[in-house]
Amino acid sequence: MATLITNIKELLQIRNHSVSKISGSEMKILPTLKNAFLIIENGLIKDFGNMKDLNGIVVNKVIDAKNKMVLPAWCDSHTHIVYAGNREGEFVDRINGLSYEEIAAKGGGILNSAKKLQQTDENELFEQSAVRLEEVLALGTGAIEIKSGYGLTPEAELKMLRVIRKLAKHYPISIKSTFLGAHAFPETYKTNKEKYIDLIIDKMLPQIAEENLADFIDVFCEKDYFTTAQTEKILKTSEAYNLTPKLHVNQFNSIGGVKLGVQYNALSVDHLEVMLPEDIEALKNGNTMPVALPSCSFFLGIPYAPARAMIDSGLPLALATDYNPGSTPSGNMNFVISTACIKMKMTPEEAINAATINGAYAMNLSKTHGSITKGKKANLIITKEIPSYNFLPYAFGSNLIDSVIIDGKQVSY
């Protein structure tokens, strides 16, 4: 089954050889080809080139992309889209002056979501989450990571991970699963936090491994959540289960989580709104991908990750949505890219690299996603007619997507 896309105004993120990630000054370079064609076969990118070099080819379908751009689908490496209900009441609380920490202290935040999720059966949780997944697919996301962490009991955490697995079976999008039992301490363990960590280590991890429910493990390493010592205890244990670390760090404070992530070869460290010089230096000593979540900063009114400082120091950077009910109730990667350009002073080239190739790296998907490369998955965005790719972050409130292709097939949700 072959599909030919013709007359592409500009084909973005073309890489003749697979590149795992883009760092430093290279992030300002976005390889493109104008007046291009692209051939899809069996769900993969078979070939691409200039229209003048297109020879006679027999295909099943032709898509005319005149005056339109084609680029890889977004790779969203940090989400929490499996959750129950919403937290719109807390949104109003913040408008009325309460901080994220104050809301959490009075039983809101993660514990609020955990209570709702524990009371929601697996089928209903799947249905609610499927609506969100279809939404982000329509917005151009072609690979996604989904975390647990709103269960906070063995039964509820496993329920979340099983829903993630079910979503992966029912939808063509590539889904990576992360166990985030260490997202917050349940109320019953507030005075005996080590007992909850033991519950994660002794009961949750073995069951998750037995059912093969997760690719990664995550910990919210932050003041008033999990200390570096508690985080390290969990990471040490998870090594026996071959779960690659991905850490929540530096959202509100720098407490050593970045250095710890590098020490344990974390695939990524995410949030990074508060970065000290020593955090940036630590990232230079490993292969850990820093991941910024600008729509979280937008929604909470907190500082943005210092993208310029990280990129200008030679580091790579990925962008993700952090789609969740409390701090980022949106999975719109297009808005993330615009916000990164507007608020974090990333160039459009840097933002697109961060949301494609580097996002794929942050999910261990570099070999199959994130660029226009022969043999990679044909997960593509075809834009509407736009003057240049700079228009994508510029027109931040417009839907500029004409169609989305996943595994070589146009999707509609």
Image (cartoon, helix red, strand yellow):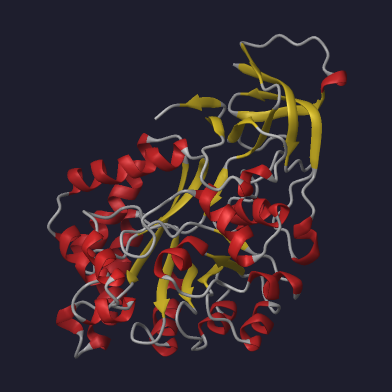
Residue at the spot 58% in from the left edge and 53% down from the top edge:
338
Residue 321 coordinates in the image, percent (x, y): 47, 57
Farthest front residue? Answer: 96
Coordinates of residue 71 in the picture (x, y in percent)? 66, 38
> In screen coordinates, is 313 left or right of 137?
right
Instruction: Give 97 or 108, whichever is nearer the viewer.
Output: 97
Q: Where does the C terminus fall, quadrant-wise?
A: top left
Q: Position of residue 10 (x, y in %)?
A: 75, 33
Instruction: Report the front residue among 55 and 352.
Output: 352
Q: Residue 143 versus residue 90: which sits nearer the camera?
A: 90
**What residue sits 47% from the left and 60% below the top?**
295
Instruction: Say above or below: 175 vs 172.
Output: below
| Observer able to see residue 241 | no
- In the image, residue 287 sits, relative to residue 124, either above or below, namely below
Image coordinates of residue 208 in percent, x first then y, are 32, 61
Identified at 52% across, 57% down, the residue is 320
If the image is split into quadrants, where does the N terminus sit? Answer: top right
